Amino acid sequence: MCRSIRAVLSAEATLGLAISSTGMGAQQPAAADSHTLDLLQKITLAQATSGNEGDVRAIIRAEVGTSVSLQETSKGDLVATLPGTDKGPVKGPVILLSAHMDEVGFQVRSITPDGFLKVAALGNWYAGSMTDHMVTVHTAHGAITGLVGVRPPHLMSADDKSKSSSVSDLYIDIGASSAEEAQKWGVRLGDRITPQSSFLPLGNSGRLVSKAWDDRVGCALLVQIVRKLAAQPHPNTIYVAWTTSEEFGRSNATVEMPDLKPDFVIVVEVGITTDTPDAKIGEQQEKLGGGPVLDLYDGSLSTTPLIRDWFTAQAKAAAIPLQYTTIAQEGSGVGMENNSYLFRDPSTALLIPLRYAHSPHGVIDIHDYIQTRELLAHILGKLDASALRHMSEKE
């Protein structure tokens, strides 16, 4: 781990206090340990676009270890099974936790006669965020560094400067002088492209910069939850799924396991902060450093008031702040994967606030990560059959 990250770790260790074993009463977030920061660094800098999540799968397998049963589905999802201790006539609910492994990226659409690469988007991109950024082109011969080109302002008219670019306008300079040379280096149509980034702190604030927080931060959090659950008895049967291709139209919590019948689904994802100077009046909802976020509505998922109120009560009992968010995007995920448990079963999503989503570099606050992890652990200890019945009542 680099020296600057260790400085963040030292600052966090000074601030953090251990969570009590009961999960009740006034608490502070637990300290960010070296394993947490190392895991976040490793998993965010891994390269894994939709359908090519192998590097992240390998990290998760290594981190979870052999003490937990891991199954890989035909789609490449990884699913951990953690049986509960409750063997009585009224068993605890079956709970599914989910986070997706893939990141937004690009693929090679064409190669110009001069050796530049034109791209197609894998996921939802604002093209302007990629201008003049370094990328990695993943070829059969190995990784090639490229630069997303930008027209010098000296050659741009006023109209050019006011126009917003599209992904079809982007081109990548890999140093090749011809299409033949690019092909000789191993570049083929369809090769995947990911942004290059670094894992770095912002000052001494506990805020961290990296790529692919969406949704590697959720993947890391679930790795740590699995390790915690494997080390201590718990009443409910819990499945933890790390899923594939969410950024390319496959809904989160879509798991190819016919025998999986969850009673409740919790997705762990990133939230979209609205705490920057470009936020519009009335748009402000969640902010960095404000704690975990409950997703009330995002264009497809709608958290019911009963679920909202129960989660709010649990956050209050654990003395963890809880934010709420509503993003009015149209129909995200609906109809794309009709076997997603996120839409079939009682469900909600816990979010870690993220600035600059779907761009080469995003920012999270380590306090938000730790508090989301501790809130989820608290919820898993309280989500029994009685709580499930209450949240499933007709309103």
Image: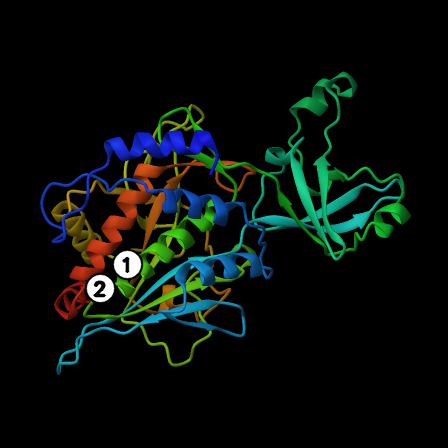
Q: Which mark is residue 55?
A: none
Q: Quadrant of residue 131?
A: top right
The image position of residue 295, as x and y in percent, is: 32, 49
Residue nearest the viewer, comparing 273 with 62: 62
Name the residue furthest top. 154
- Count residues near mark 2 (Cα–Cα under 10 Å), then give few for <14, some for 14-19, many for 20+: few
Q: Residue at x 53, y 55 (%)?
A: 102
Coordinates of residue 357 in the picture (x, y in percent): 48, 40
Q: Amino acid at mark 2?
A: Gln
Residue 93 quadrant: bottom left
Q: What is the quadrant of the C terminus in the image? A: bottom left
* Circle 1: element type: helix
Q: Residue at x 12, y 48 (%)?
A: 317
The residue indicated by pointer 1 is 228
Residue drawn at x 45%, y 29% is 4
CB within 8 Å, label 2 to label 1: yes
- The residue that disc 2 covers is 232
The residue under label 1 is which amino acid type? Lys
Residue 325 x/y as whole percent: 32, 43
Q: Does 79 appear above or below 130?
A: below
Is 259 above or below relative to 312?
below
Q: Position of residue 87 (x, y in %)?
A: 17, 80
Q: Residue at x 25, y 31 (%)?
A: 14
Tell which of 210 and 340 is nearer to you: 210
What is the secondary structure assignment of the residue under circle 2?
loop
